[in-house]
Image: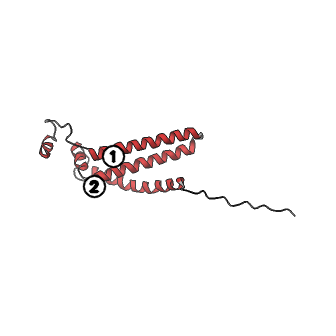
Amino acid sequence: MATQTVAAPPRRQRGVNVEKWGWVFMRVSGLVLVVLIFGHLFINLMVGEGIHALDFAFIAGKFASPWWQWWDVLMLWLALLHGANGMRTIVNDYVTTEKVRKVLVGAIVLAAGLLIILGTLVVFTFDPCLGVTESSTLWETCQAQG
């Protein structure tokens, strides 16, 4: 009579499952981005004078409001993180060399981090009066602000 060996069940890895949380993040951030992007497009293209109102003064007016600053920053952060996570997934799926994979994922993280920092600085330090001359349509507005 032959003895039958039973394989031990596979062990669960301890720690955070990065791939699972990356998958969950893509779904949640995708849904939030749909709301943020369509809200952005609706306000910029449909409300008021629509696309004809889009100019430097319109953007300056939006960036004067903390609400719109945070709306645009959240949209920027989520879009960059969503895109970087997607690129990380593609690199992990198609790059077979471990060293090359680490370099590419590192470059993706570096690029996304740099763009998040620069984009956030632009939104929160935006000054519409910087460099305004007397020939500008913003001259009187900027002079009134002091």
Residue at 27%, 55% in the rendered image: 67
Q: Position of residue 9 (x, y in %)?
A: 68, 61
Q: Quadrant of the C terminus?
A: top left
Residue extending farthest bottom? 1
- The residue wearing badge 2 is 67
- Can see residue 72? yes
Q: Residues within 10 Å of mark 2 (few under 14, many from 20)?
A: few
Q: Secondary structure at mark 2?
A: helix
If the image is split into quadrants, where does the N terminus sit?
bottom right
Which x, y percent locates residue 101?
55, 41
Task: Check disc 1: other Cα within 10 Å, few if <14, some if 14-19, many if 20+.
Answer: some
Q: Earlier in the sequence, mark 2 or mark 1?
A: 2
Figure coloring: secondary structure
Residue at left offset 83%, top offset 62% = 3
Looking at this view, is 84 or 106 the one in front? 106
Q: Position of residue 22 (x, y in %)?
A: 50, 53
Amino acid of disc 2: Trp
Give the side of residue 55 with respect to residue 111, left or right.
left
Look at the picture and state if 146 lies above or below 12. Answer: above
In the rendering, at what x and y percent does residue 2 appear?
A: 85, 62
Q: Is residue 53 visible?
A: no
| Residue under label 1 | 120
Name the amino acid, label 1.
Thr
Query: Horizontally, is 80 left or right of 89 in the view?
Result: left
Q: CA distance from mark 2 to mark 1?
A: 14 Å
**Which is closer to the viewer, label 2 or label 1?**
1
Identified at 56% across, 45% down, the residue is 93
Question: Measuring 80% from the left and 62% from the top, which residue is drawn there?
Answer: 4
- The secondary structure type at the circle numbered 1 is helix
Q: Is residue 1 above or below residue 93?
A: below
Depth check: 131 or 136 in front? 131
